[in-house]
Image (spheres, helix red, strand yellow):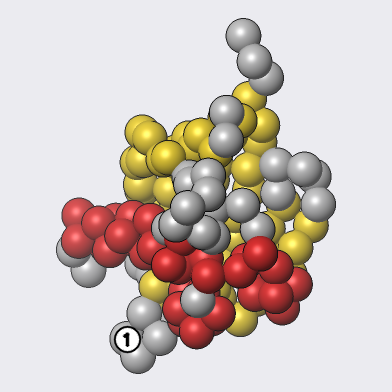
Amino acid sequence: MNVDSSVAEVIERELQLLSPSGRSSRALADQLLDPEFVEVGASGRRWDRQSMLSALPVMQGASDDGPQYLPTEITGTVLAPGIVHLTFETMLDGRRARRSSIWRKLDVESGWRMYYHQATPVPEA
């Protein structure tokens, strides 16, 4: 496994999920979210895969003409073969959040999928 290429591929997929086209396309999100996906959002709400797939198209960041996620400082680490952890910050409509995602690759066919995501709001200074 090439560590650099694994991290680069996962970052590319994370950016797809943050983009309006990734958020508004249930088919693309379906390919990127792991069957066991769980998220703890910045609101504190816990999301499972089905609730996230249903909500993504209508959430902020899903429209080309509305607020969009601006990610910064994305870094990744391979924790084990087939497991990558990303950390980064986002800005959306004036709100900043620190984010952490765990991606796993169960097989070559399905590729990297987001297994877990957590967002923590950053209070204004």
Closer to the camera in the image, 111 or 49? 49
Which type of secondary structure does the marked residue at label 1 adopt? loop
Closer to the camera in the image, 94 or 15? 94
In the displayed structure image, the side of residue 58 where residue 115 appears, left or right: left
**Residue occupying image coordinates x 70% and y 68%:** 55
**Residue occupying image coordinates x 36% and y 48%:** 77
Q: Where the C terminus falls, by quadrant?
A: top right
Amino acid type of the residue that numbered disc 1 sits on in the rendered structure: Val
Residue 58 coordinates in the image, percent (x, y): 66, 64
**Residue occupying image coordinates x 52% and y 65%:** 23
In the displayed structure image, the side of residue 44 where residue 25 appears, left or right: left
Residue 72 coordinates in the image, percent (x, y): 38, 35
Q: Where the N terminus falls, by quadrant?
A: bottom left
Instruction: Determine whether 55 is above or below 42 in the image.
Output: below
Residue 101 coordinates in the image, percent (x, y): 52, 53
Q: Residue furthest right?
A: 45
Instruction: Determine whether 72 is above or below 52 in the image.
Output: above
In the displayed structure image, the side of residue 95 where residue 67 appears, left or right: left
Q: Which residue is mark 1?
A: 108
Tell me if residue 34 can be seen.
yes
Q: Residue furthest front?
A: 65
Closer to the camera in the image, 51 or 86? 51
Residue 29 coordinates in the image, percent (x, y): 51, 74
Tell me if residue 101 can be seen.
no
Instruction: Determine whether 113 is above or below 8 in the image.
Output: below
